[in-house]
Amino acid sequence: MRFTMPDSGDGMGLNGSLDVYVNGTKVKTVSLSSYYNWQYFSGDMPADAPGGGRPLFRFDEVHWKLDTPLAPGDTIRIQKGNGDSLEYGVDFLEIEPVPAAVARPTNAVSVTDYGAVANDGQDDLAAFKSAVTAAVSAGKTLYIPEGTFNLSSMWEIGSANNMINNLTVTGAGIWHTNIQFTNPNAAGGGISLRISGKLDFSNVYMNSKLRSRYGQNAIYKGFMDNFGSNSTIHDVWVEHFECGFWVGDYAHTPAIYANGLTIENSRIRNNLADGVNFAQGTSNSIVRNSNLRNNGDDALAVWTSDTNGAPAGVNNTFSYNTIENNWRAGGIAFFGGSGHKADHNLIVDTVGGSGIRMNTVFPGYHFQNNTGIVFSDTTIINSGTSQDLYNGERGAIDLEASNDAIRNVTFTNIDILNTQRDAIQFGYGGGFQNIVFNNININGTGLDGVTTSRFSGPHQGAAIFTYTGNGSATFNGLTTSNVAYPSLYYLQPGFNLTIQ
């Protein structure tokens, strides 16, 4: 259930509850808190308490199991019955059958063999670490059974100086194994992976007590550091971290980059920053069949950073994902490299940014050696904004050539629906080369009604908006309807737009 409720004056949140009725009978009282709900922005820096700036985030989620399965035709009602003075908002319910728990595999070590006790409220970190050591030395799978396990600090699987070769970790399933990181402080939780070979990690729900980005340096990702080669992380549910996944090595020079990583069939939600960031040379890797919702920076990104001598990441893919309610930056972002693909994605309700964005703002490699990046078969709904965190407009597709050129990019079979401002936006003077759009459908722009512009003269939302005269783009098969700007295209002199 996605919900909203007021913050407290100190930003630490209020507590409350809502009742669940099935066919008129109360079946559950669900405890709620706004501990995670709110972030406040003055510029691009988040604050944690009211008065810190423009409020964003707002929503959080809670999930629970009913004692009796629902049947077709059942009616569910959410109702306040606790008599408090708080106003609650409920956005939606998602309902699914709970699968059976994954049994302990043969030839597996369990964390309970080494002292972890489910549901006792005590710290299980030492037991988890001992179980990893035992599983690695015996070449066995590590199993985390049903129940809630508390970890008081970062779970380090291997170390920078003693990396683990191969490891398989499985829980009992996202509805059964609950890993709670209990430390709310910077660098206080998440999983630090130091894998040199292949990792297979699956079937857990993970949550934390983090509620602040600490000046954007929380170092508290769900998964981070060294992910090995040809690793798979699947069927995990990750929320309330700084990022869901930050794939990057900052402990070795040259950086040891992830290659062939697959993240799939997962839920990455309600994190303060990125959902997944493929950084530090990550290559030939994929995120697919996953849901990314309510994240506070790019939902899916490739940042081709060069810290610690990392190479430029290449050939990364984002496929068949649903991205919702991103409240900062973009749904999908490529910042450099070559050979990336994003296909068959649905991007809905980006609050403070774009559905798709590319830029040359960040340090590292850009698109100098790009031989081809492709976006295809994607729908972008209710995206873009007239007020990002810098009080500027962002297109549903936003291309920003700040420091050097964006080149050799193809967009094919893209539906851009109900854009808040401009559908496709080109900006800054670095240049645009060989940018091709095929079969683009734009239906609805300017829905927020704002006409002021940080980058140009006042204008309603256009199908195509450029605030640079340096560059060109070609459209083959462009369809537009319900465009607020009467002339359809708001172009700066010198920008060469070809529509055929």
Image (cartoon, rainbow, N blue to C red):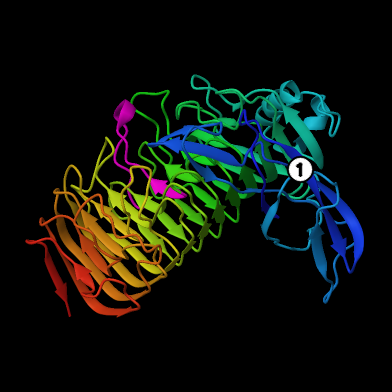
Residue at 41% across, 56% down: 317
Query: Foreground: 291 or 112?
Result: 291
Q: Quadrant of the N terminus?
A: bottom right
The magenta-colored residue range is 299-315
Query: Foreground: 51 or 500?
Result: 51
Q: Position of residue 381 (x, y in %)?
A: 45, 67
In which quadrant of the rendered view does residue 290 lie?
Answer: bottom right
In-image side of 270 versus 393 (left or right): right
Query: Foreground: 265 or 68?
Result: 68
**Residue hosting label 1:** 177
Q: Residues within 10 Å of mark 1 (few under 14, many from 20)?
A: many
Q: Residue furthest front?
A: 85
Q: Position of residue 307 (x, y in %)?
A: 32, 29
Q: Position of residue 147 (x, y in %)?
A: 82, 40
Element at badge 1? strand
The three-letter amino acid code for the residue at tag 1 is: Thr
In-image side of 297 versus 19 (left or right): left
Is residue 474 visible in the rendered image? The answer is yes
